[in-house]
Image: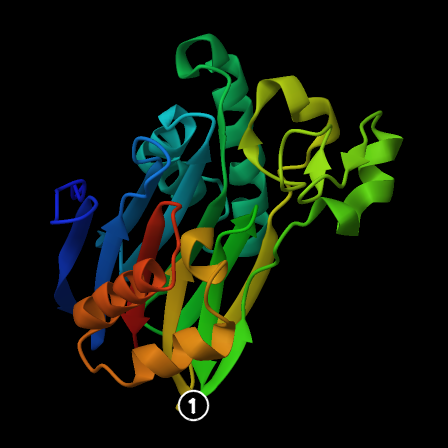
Amino acid sequence: MLDTHTKAKRIGEGSGASQVHSDVKYGYSLVRGRRHKMEDFHVAEFRRTGSHEVGLFAVYDGHSGRSVAHYLQQNLFDNILHQPGFWEDPVNSIMKAYHATDEEILDESPNLGGSGSTAVTAILIDGVHLLVANVGDSRALLCRKGAAIQASVDHDPLQEENVIEERGGFVSQVEVPRVDGILAMSRAFGDEILKDHLSVDPDIFENSIGEGDEFIVLESDGISQVMHNEEVINLVRSVDDPEAAARALTREAVKRGSTDDISAIVVRF
């Protein structure tokens, strides 16, 4: 796994060299915010699995600590790929693996500190079959013929207020909507003290990569808080190299005043 927590002049920054696998290039950039120790983790790699070449990409944005995000970095994709029947029904396998991994995190809660994390994951099978899943507010954006398609769902507590209340929780609306007045999202890994009121069901987007599909961006909310989807897509389209594009995104977010951890992965088809 690539360590990206290096230092830049202003705040911590890391970036990855562009890679080429089956005509797919990727790059990433992570910048530590001003508020706390770096809590974002990522995955960006290709694996050969039997006769398949699998691209694995993810952004995990930890909250109330970094332990759960780090656990996801180390374990979630293995849990997905090792699910029985993954190649026959990858959507069901992703759903099962998200739940199984969350159960592991809860079991390890005393060691992980009871914290939580978002997740946005993308699996690219043989360069043509794309599966994106997410819980929380980290985003995936697909560029199709120049247009921005959000391939993830921001899990806003207000949108799931009825479900949260049915589970015995509540949604406060001081500053931003929060589950039980604490967490500003309705779905997440971990968060033991809120777990009875949260979901870890991922929203899953499935797509066959076609001629009009140019690239996908995975981003933490350190970007989406200060940039609209179309602005992200337009910036990335203007930079050919995916590493340079990811770095341009994180720098633009800093320029616009983002103080959170900022993470971006660009995968160009």
Q: Horizontal and vertical percent for residue 99?
A: 58, 34
Q: Quadrant of residue 24?
A: bottom left
In the rendered view, would you say 242 is above or below 140? below
Q: Horizontal and vertical percent for residue 13?
A: 19, 49
- Rate crowding at label 1 as few (under 14), some (14 to 19) or many (20 or more) other CA atoms within 10 Å: few
Q: Is residue 88 visible?
A: no
Say which residue appears at 29% left-offset and 48% top-offset: 43
Q: How is the image coloured?
A: rainbow
Q: Quadrant of residue 55?
A: bottom left
Q: Horizontal and vertical percent for residue 211?
A: 39, 91
Front residue (pair 158, 46): 158
In the rendered view, would you say 124 is above or below 269? above
Q: Which quadrant: the N terminus? A: top left
Q: Horizontal and vertical percent for residue 30?
A: 26, 51
Q: Which quadrant: the C terminus? A: bottom left
Residue 145 located left or right of residue 106: left
- Amino acid at the residue labelled 1: Gly
Residue 128 located left or right of residue 100: left
State the residue position of label 1: 212
Front residue (pair 159, 195): 159
In the rendered view, would you say 23 is above or below 146? above
Say which residue appears at 53% left-offset and 46% top-offset: 93
